[in-house]
Image (spheres, rainbow, N blue to C red):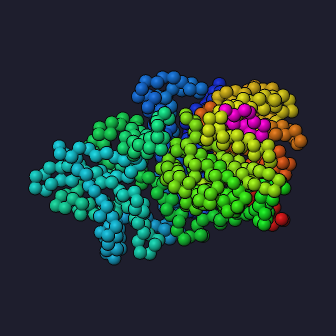
Amino acid sequence: MSALPLNPVNGATTTVGVAVPPETRYVNRELSWLDFNARVLHLAEDFELPLLERVRFLAIFSSNLDEFFQVRVAALKEQVLVGVRAKGPDGIDAAGQLRSIRSRVEDLVTQQTTVFTKELVPALRDAGIQFVDYEDLNEGDREQLDRVFDERVFPVLTPLAVDPAHPFPYISNLSLNLAVVARDPLSGEQRFARVKVPPLLPRFVALADGERFIALETLIAAHLDMLFPGMEIVTCHPFRVTRNADLALDDDAEDLLQAMEEVLQQRTKFGIEVRLEVDTTMDDEVLDLLQRELELTDNEVYVVDGPLDLAGVMALTDLDRPDLLSPRLSSYTPSAFTAEDLFGALRAHEVLVHHPYESFATTVEAFLATAARDPHVLAIKQTLYRTGGDEEGIVDALASAARAGKQVAAVVELKARFDELTNIERARLLEQAGVHVVYGLVGLKTHAKAALVVRQEHNGIRRYCHLGTGNYNPKTARLYEDLGLFSADPELGAEVAELFNHLTGYSRPRGFHRLLVAPSDLRGAITDRVRAQARPGGRITMKMNALVDSEMIDTLYEASIAGCEIDLVIRGVCCLVPGVAGRSDRIRVRSIIGRYLEHSRVFRFGDAPPDREYLIGSADLMPRNLDGRVEALVSITDPASQARLDEILDVNLEDDVLAWEMQPDGTWHKCRPERFVETHLRLHDLTAARTVGV
């Protein structure tokens, strides 16, 4: 079943995805991810969204697809190359997955190109934002672009010819290139050359009016005579190569930091090719040359009837056009963080914060900045997975605390995919400030989100901690929906201290009460809680990014069969099939896709208070989270915080504007608005009312 039209009329149902056979127990992970990205693409087609928000989602779709090929498709290709024929839980081997992926991606890219060229480009033109070709411009406009090319573009271009003295050049990952065929008018000889479009320059060059734009590759193509003087340009075609970007790091290396730097160089230089993108104008002879030199089959070539690398249109969302963007929602500060004595406020009661509705800067960053300045604070410990952002904030607070003589330890995860280089830079900056930097446990990524502050008080030492669902990253905290718990509970503080001792030393955890930690006890603890609800009257609600683990899925199936009602809010991949009679007819699955990326993990077990148990933390129900990473969930025991989680989950389950519901055949249907509950607006309004009420 192919995707249906995505702007329903006359009550039609919006559907994305490909139907699975009725007997299917597990949806293929990769195809489920593509269904998620199709839901993102749908937002680019939503006429009710402001125009530049539609452009933003189109760019996100393109970036998502790039990462999918770099990681997931690359891994499958490597399995095929080494002869792995094992089938996954869904019964499909790597070769079969690649075939299915290609078919689905072709449809999605066609859909993406259509919405860009047929809908967004005309709508942008009507709004005064226009894409132009060099040939269609008047003399004044061309003179301006000629100056831009001479001063900013030409000096950084390097044409690379291919002939007996010049081998085919290495094509770097995700680079946009021009394949040029030039003819010597004297000898008639034709040669191939590659021109790389400089990635550090703006993807679109603005004309003087700031409303018309020309693609950088189009501007370069219009000036090829300067790159190949005295030659005739026969053809010029854009192309783009995607390579494997996953890392194979030797965890036994004596210097993990140096080993990671060497592997990052390998990513840039030696990743295998997994995708070649070309447009419809490329002639067969040039395409054959590219395929031959890159050693790519027809199945790895994607012909795009439009511009390549549409992730670049994200730059348009920075234009000063508030009329074409959604109004920015305010972030608020909980009362505890406006108190004169922050630590006193946290001693009084635990505080649950919800980003971005509540400010990351005035809560998490303020907590660590306050600790860094406080003369009574003796030590700070912190996990860092994706740092990002400016050097101010979290990293600056840790460095300042170390320079002030406090004991500061940072567990920096060097293998956080695509953030490795940033984390290396942050690790060195912290070390220079005197922070004790460690890189976690051998063979395991440290994905837990935890911070610990040790403070000397009049009645002894007290620990203050923060445990969250998202990264300590000020940039993503403005876009990602996440939760965090601040606590001065002595028992929880002791458990967090033991977790850090495990990460930085050689201790073996003795077991926890409020914490559930992977890979030691998280899988078993979640399984036990699901089975405890496997009865008539049992109730489970889970919110996460992905549900992949087949053992967990089977346990949920068993609970449904036993009479438990189960609601799952899963943003991305869901390999469970809901609503199947006799197996999962008591399981409902929905996905919320909108202005914020739903990132928090919340687990609620039980029908009603006071018997309900609540957990939040860093782990999705995926094999890598349960068995291959250090993860932490924390039990939420404060009644006010529990009520806040109920509110969040209830809004997610009531949403009929952003929500999609998964069907028994594995496809996704867009909810039809009736109550017009929109998760992000509703939670923003509830946070505002709560804050103003204080």
For the stretch drawn in magenta, what is the main secondary structure? Answer: loop
Give the position of the N terminus as an image quadrant: top right
The correct choice, above or below, for 153 with respect to 246 in the image is below
- Residue at 59%, 27% (x, y): give it: 90
Instruction: Determine the image quadrant of residue 336.
Output: bottom right
Judge whether 496 appears above or below 54 on screen: above
Magenta-highlighted residues: 508-518
Q: Within the image, what quadrant is residue 524 found in?
A: top right
Residue sitting nearer the eye, 649 or 455: 455
Residue sitting at x 64%, y 49%? 382
Where, quadrant-wise, is the C terminus in this rendering? bottom right
Q: On the picture, is 195 further left or further right than 600? A: left
Check residue 512 for magenta coloring.
Answer: yes
Q: Is residue 499 left or right of residue 412?
A: right
In this rendering, would 284 be left or right of 508? left
Q: Where is residue 231? Give x, y as percent.
A: 18, 58
Rendered location of residue 122, percent (x, y): 49, 63
Q: How many marks?
A: 0
Percent across and percent down for residue 473 are: 60, 54
Say if residue 236 shows up in the picture: no
The front one of 412 and 638 is: 412
Foreground residue among 404 and 412? 404
Q: Position of residue 554 (x, y in %)?
A: 70, 27
Task: Determine if the magenta segment contains residue 517.
Answer: yes
274, 268: nearer the viewer: 268
Q: Residue at x 42, y 54 (%)?
A: 307
